[in-house]
Image: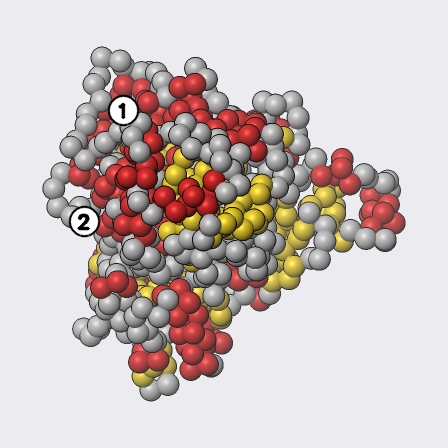
């Protein structure tokens, strides 16, 4: 089904894979009649060519990328534009789309959501952008329909910014990276590795894109096989997949922790662009005659079966057949894993979902950028036609990904078919992906064709004793389960016919509703502010010496951004940095905010030129210990703040708030064994926080203890590989080592200046 190559491979004519090794050169000569160098062959990937076309550094080892277009949604665009405004924004230099698909429903009352939408519309007018009103389209579907282009690059402030199936290299990053593009700066990365995803065969009926994606995620997430690399989809199997199917696999590549993705393109992709009125955007993409990849994932499409990702991670995968055959053993394993994620704070079991030896789920959802595609919904309707979901606990909601899709479903009768079964069809909305829509009841299990199933993604509040859970599945098996009134069922058991209606895109829907400035900025338009839209607080530059208090210690194998700053109703404060910060780590460590704010009193006293020891009396003993070895440390050369330790923080969302909330509460650093994603580490850096690394198994401090990092400013300036820090004991300092990892010169300057806003003020 899925196999990983142990090393690099050569791909000849997009058909023959030759593993790198002693016989590789001989086989290449047999296949091509010539020898090909590895470096030259590595430049034949589609990814290399696209990156080269967008690189401004003149050096393909250290890239400085300028993107063609950008896209954000209403959890992120206010903070991005506010940061850019504070840094000197005059005009959007490239097309920038502001969609309103995350906070289309008001979670807490008041005017917060609509105020942000009006802020977005006014900014699109003033700075020359594009504004997509609520309920029109989820962010990624609009980008596929109206932004993507062959050989282009798009940057988005949502982690699932993936349009590789359409020949577009797209990346999801934290807001500050978009700010850099708005200020005509660059996205700076080392040249990424490229891994081939070599597809053969054709999916059997009932297997959908989510099944293929989950199978791949299960094979590569834990071992980091594609971490921060580009996944390049090649091989003869690609042509057997429709455009919608490829899109459905592609969007889930984010859950592998890869950097981006790109696919070979063909007539099916040409037809996609033509149907959406943009035939000129099609570009044929394929690897060179001989191409070298840093690894290879072999995907036998015909051997993949309906999959389920059990709570609480997309990589916790089984076939549905396997799950049904070994149900109690698998549920036992899921419950044990859950105790790690939930810290034992709430009783969690799925065994009470077993009825007559089968798993009975409570809710089905087909939604968003992953599930809300036209083909997914039409196939689900075919499976459900003539069936009823029943009148017990089980419910089914379907969210088409855009109004054009919704309209076509109404015209071809699929909408009526679905509603007749008892399903509810709703407008384009990302809420089910982050806990703001279709929240299940306590102890319920939801099966979803969406992107993630992390803890709290369905609306749980563990601290209040409320827990529900999500399993990820394909729309087809969700429909088969719904037809069975909630009993877990693979879609391969459906023996009926898939009608596969043809899709017709109605361009008038957007033409008469979406505001498009066509790149023209109108400075006569005033930006519209609501009372919840606040400026970023002032942030200090990195001091010469730093005292840190550890205020949270997390030993989970992976810590998600949802655990660092919960999604759901908390995001209503997304435009209010201090208001949102009150929720930081609230579902993982409810005491974090209070501890951090207590420490922050000392830094605020320093900034006000008053005595930090009076603001934080416990600091007196810390300073006495510091002075035993560093008597010169004191007024004018020290800063005080907080830090957290986590084994591997930052998996999941691109939301910058996972870092910025810590910063506005006085956080100066994270300490980790490794960072789960590049984007979370970049968020830390862009908010002036030190992304410290410490060797696994070496933790010379614990929660509540103080650390002293002397000469930290000079260490950053000197590009020190190893930084000596100290745990502050009673009247003594105990040394240990930290590292910062690779940092670009600009990243060092951002940290030294205290944050990206300060950096641009200093470097106008």
381 w.r.t. 358: above or below: above
Label 1, on which residue?
123
Contact flag, marks 1 and 2 (Cβ < 8 Å): no
Residue 503 visible: no
Q: Residue at x 26, y 62 (%)?
A: 463
| Position of residue 89 in the picture relative to residue 29 (left or right) | left
Q: Secondary structure at mark 1?
A: helix
Residue 108 image offset from top left, x and y in percent: 16, 48
Q: Which mark is residue 107?
A: 2
Badge 1, how many Cα within 10 Å: few under 14, some, many 20+?
many
Q: Specify the quadrant that holds the N terminus.
A: bottom right
Regarding residue 581, the answer to whether it shows in the image is yes
**Residue at 72% across / 50% down in the picture?**
8
Position above or below: 522 against 422: above
352 horizontally vs 325: left or right: left
| Drawn side of residue 217 relative to residue 452, left or right | right
Residue placed most toward the observer, 402 or 703: 703
Image location (x, y in percent) of residue 397:
26, 59
Colouring: secondary structure
Upstream in the sequence, badge 1 or badge 2? 2
x%, y% of residue 739? 58, 43
Q: Position of residue 253 (x, y in %)?
A: 50, 50
User: How far apart are the alpha carbons under marks 1 and 2?
Assistant: 24 Å
């Amino acid at each position: 089904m899925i196999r990983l190559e142990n090393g690099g491979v050569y791909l000849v004519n997009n058909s023959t894979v030759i593993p790198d090794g002693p016989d590789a050169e001989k086989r290449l000569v047999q296949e091509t009649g010539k020898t090909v160098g590895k470096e030259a062959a590595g430049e034949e990937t589609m990814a290399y060519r696209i990156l080269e076309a967008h690189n401004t550094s003149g050096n393909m080892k250290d890239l400085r990328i300028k993107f063609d277009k950008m896209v954000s949604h209403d959890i992120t665009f206010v903070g991005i534009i506010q940061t850019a405004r504070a840094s000197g924004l005059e005009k959007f230099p490239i097309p920038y789309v502001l969609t309103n698909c995350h906070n289309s429903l008001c979670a807490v009352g008041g005017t917060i959501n609509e105020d942000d939408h009006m802020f977005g519309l006014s900014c699109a007018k003033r700075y020359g952008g594009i504004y997509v009103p609520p309920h029109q389209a989820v962010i990624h579907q609009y980008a596929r329909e109206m932004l993507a282009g062959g050989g282009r690059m798009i940057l988005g402030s949502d982690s699932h910014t993936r349009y590789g199936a359409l020949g577009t290299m797209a990346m999801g990053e934290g807001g500050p990276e978009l700010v850099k593009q708005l200020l005509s700066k660059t996205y700076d990365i080392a040249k990424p590795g490229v891994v081939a995803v070599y597809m053969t065969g054709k999916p059997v009926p009932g297997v959908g894109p989510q099944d293929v994606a989950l199978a791949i995620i299960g094979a590569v997430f834990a071992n980091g096989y594609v971490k921060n690399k580009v996944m390049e989809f090649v091989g003869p199997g690609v042509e057997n997949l429709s455009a919608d199917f490829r899109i459905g696999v592609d969007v889930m590549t984010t859950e592998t922790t890869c950097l981006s993705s790109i696919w070979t393109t063909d007539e099916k992709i040409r037809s996609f662009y033509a149907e959406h009125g943009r035939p000129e955007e099609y570009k044929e993409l394929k690897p060179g005659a001989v191409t070298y990849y840093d690894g290879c994932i072999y995907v036998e499409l015909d051997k993949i079966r309906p999959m389920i990702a059990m709570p609480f991670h997309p990589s916790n995968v089984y076939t549905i057949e396997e799950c049904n055959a070994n149900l109690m053993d698998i549920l036992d394993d899921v419950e044990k894993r859950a105790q790690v994620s939930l810290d034992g704070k709430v009783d969690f079991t799925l065994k009470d979902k077993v009825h007559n030896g089968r798993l009975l789920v409570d809710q089905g959802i087909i939604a968003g950028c992953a599930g809300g595609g036209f083909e997914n919904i039409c196939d689900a309707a075919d499976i459900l036609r003539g069936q009823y979901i029943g009148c017990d606990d089980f419910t089914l909601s379907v969210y088409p990904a855009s109004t054009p899709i919704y309209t076509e479903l109404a015209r071809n009768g699929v909408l009526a078919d679905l509603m007749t079964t008892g399903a509810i069809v709703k407008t384009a909305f990302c809420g089910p992906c982050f806990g703001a829509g279709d929240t299940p009841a306590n102890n319920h299990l939801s099966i979803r064709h969406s992107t993630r199933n992390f803890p709290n993604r369905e609306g749980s509040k563990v601290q209040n004793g409320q827990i529900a859970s999500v399993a990820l599945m394909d729309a087809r098996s969700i429909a088969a389960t719904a037809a069975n009134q909630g009993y877990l069922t693979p879609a391969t058991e459906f023996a009926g016919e898939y009608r596969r209606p043809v899709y017709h895109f109605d361009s008038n829907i957007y033409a008469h509703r979406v505001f498009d400035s066509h790149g023209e900025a109108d400075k006569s338009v005033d930006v519209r502010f609501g009372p919840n839209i606040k400026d970023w607080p002032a942030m200090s530059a990195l001091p010469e010496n730093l005292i840190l208090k550890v205020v949270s210690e997390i030993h989970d194998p992976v810590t998600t951004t949802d655990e660092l700053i919960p999604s759901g109703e908390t995001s209503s404060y997304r435009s209010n940095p201090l208001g949102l910060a009150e929720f930081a780590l609230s579902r993982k460590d409810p005491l974090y905010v209070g501890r951090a704010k207590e420490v922050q009193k000392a830094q605020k006293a320093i900034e006000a030129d008053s005595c930090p020891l009076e603001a934080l009396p416990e600091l007196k003993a810390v300073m006495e210990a510091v002075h035993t070895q560093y008597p010169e440390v004191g007024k004018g050369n020290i800063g005080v703040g907080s830090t957290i330790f986590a084994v591997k923080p930052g998996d999941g969302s691109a939301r910058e708030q996972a870092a910025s909330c810590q910063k506005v509460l006085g956080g100066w650093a994270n300490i980790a064994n490794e960072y789960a994603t590049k984007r979370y580490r970049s968020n830390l850096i862009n908010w002036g926080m030190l992304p410290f690394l410490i060797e696994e198994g070496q933790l010379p401090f614990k929660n509540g203890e103080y650390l002293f990092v002397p000469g930290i400013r000079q260490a950053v300036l000197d590009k020190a590989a190893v930084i000596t820090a100290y745990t502050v004991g009673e009247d003594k300092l105990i040394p240990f080592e930290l590292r910062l990892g690779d940092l670009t010169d600009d990243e060092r300057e951002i940290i030294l200046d205290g944050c990206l806003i300060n950096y641009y003020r200093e470097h106008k």
